[in-house]
């Protein structure tokens, strides 16, 4: 069986899968960095067109949560799940906070303000929406503060899939808020702050955070040089041309 993970350093969803791979010590899964704006070839070969994408013997598995479950089934040891259904439910609830309440909200905020593709934050004209989204992030961090483990891990006193989801999610939220020059709510929540400080000492977490920082710096350089906009325009032109081409 041959596997390849298509990934972005700066994607928190892709980082979730990479951290799982590192935590399980898997060495037989190749990783390939894709461009920020997906090429026409990717859209043609992968209808869902999402990163990360795990290619298994030529077939693509999309969505980080789906990939995570697949890898746990294929490589059950060492387990990043619990030993009971209740423990697994708690792990999945924490991971869902990272995916849905943190990353999705931060991504929406980034899309509105140009945090991912502009040299400086873009005035939206709807600052009330920006305030609403940043408030939702603060509320979600407060909820997480009540649920997060106190022993340096998200739960169970060891690395789980919850950590794989939360480590990149928290880093992504901080990056987006600071880029927008908004307050970072993590510092105001002692349990989350202590967790973030402690989990970074775990090698799989430290590795994905270093990759995220590398990707963030690369993205900033692409923005400043105009390379990112050139890639976007070229890929958009290719998609428009493909849509105009009649199907034989």
Image (cartoon, rainbow, N blue to C red):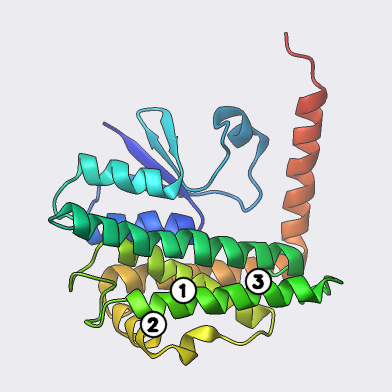
According to the picture, the residue beneath numbered tag 1 turns out to be 170
C-alpha separation, residue under disc 1 versus residue under disc 2: 9 Å
Element carrying mark 2: helix
Q: Nearer the viewer, residue 51 or 159?
A: 159
Q: Residue at x 72, y 67 (%)?
A: 223
User: Residue 7: x percent and y percent?
Assistant: 48, 51
> In this picture, is 28 found above or below 55?
below
Please say whether residue 92 is visible from this viewpoint: yes
Looking at marks 1 and 2 on the same chain, the residue that comes earlier in the sequence is marked by 1
According to the picture, the residue beneath numbered tag 3 turns out to be 133
Relative side of 64 to 152, left or right: right
Q: Are marks 1 and 2 in contact (CB under 8 Å)?
A: yes
Total residue callouts:
3
Q: Residue at x 76, y 27 (%)?
A: 242
User: Residue 13: x percent and y percent?
Assistant: 47, 56
Please say whether residue 81 is visible from this viewpoint: no
| Furthest residue toward top | 248
Q: Where is the N terminus found, in terms of image quarters?
A: top left
Number of residues whose C-alpha sits closer than 10 Å to that of mark 1, classed few (under 14), some (14–19) or many (20 or more): many
Residue 99 is tagged as none
According to the picture, the residue beneath numbered tag 2 turns out to be 192
Element carrying mark 1: helix
Quadrant of residue 128 in the image?
bottom right
User: Residue 205: x percent and y percent?
Assistant: 33, 71
Relative side of 152 to 228, left or right: left
C-alpha separation, residue under disc 3 versus residue under disc 2: 19 Å
- Pair 1/3: label in front: 3
Looking at marks 3 and 2 on the same chain, the residue that comes earlier in the sequence is marked by 3
């Amino acid at each position: 069986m041959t596997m390849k993970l298509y990934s972005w350093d700066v994607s928190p969803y892709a980082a979730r899968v990479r951290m799982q791979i590192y935590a399980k010590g898997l060495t037989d899964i190749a990783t390939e960095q894709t461009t920020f704006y997906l090429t026409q070839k990717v859209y043609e070969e992968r209808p869902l067109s999402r990163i990360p994408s795990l290619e298994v013997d030529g077939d693509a598995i999309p969505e980080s949560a789906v990939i995570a479950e697949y890898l746990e089934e294929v490589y059950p040891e060492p387990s990043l799940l619990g030993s009971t259904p209740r423990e697994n439910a708690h792990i999945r609830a924490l991971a869902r906070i990272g995916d849905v309440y943190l990353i999705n909200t931060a991504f929406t905020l980034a899309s509105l303000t140009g945090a991912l593709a502009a040299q400086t934050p873009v005035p939206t004209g709807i600052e009330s929406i920006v305030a609403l989204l940043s408030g939702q992030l603060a509320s979600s961090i407060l909820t997480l503060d009540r649920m997060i483990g106190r022993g340096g891990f998200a739960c169970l006193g060891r690395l789980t899939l919850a950590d794989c989801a939360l480590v990149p999610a928290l880093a992504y939220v901080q990056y987006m808020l600071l880029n927008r020059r908004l307050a970072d709510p993590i510092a105001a929540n002692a349990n989350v702050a202590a967790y973030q400080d402690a989990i970074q000492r775990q090698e799989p977490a430290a590795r994905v955070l270093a990759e995220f920082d590398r990707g963030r710096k690369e993205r900033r350089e692409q923005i400043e040089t105009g390379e990112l906009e050139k890639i976007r325009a070229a890929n958009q032109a290719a998609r428009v041309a493909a849509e105009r081409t009649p199907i034989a």
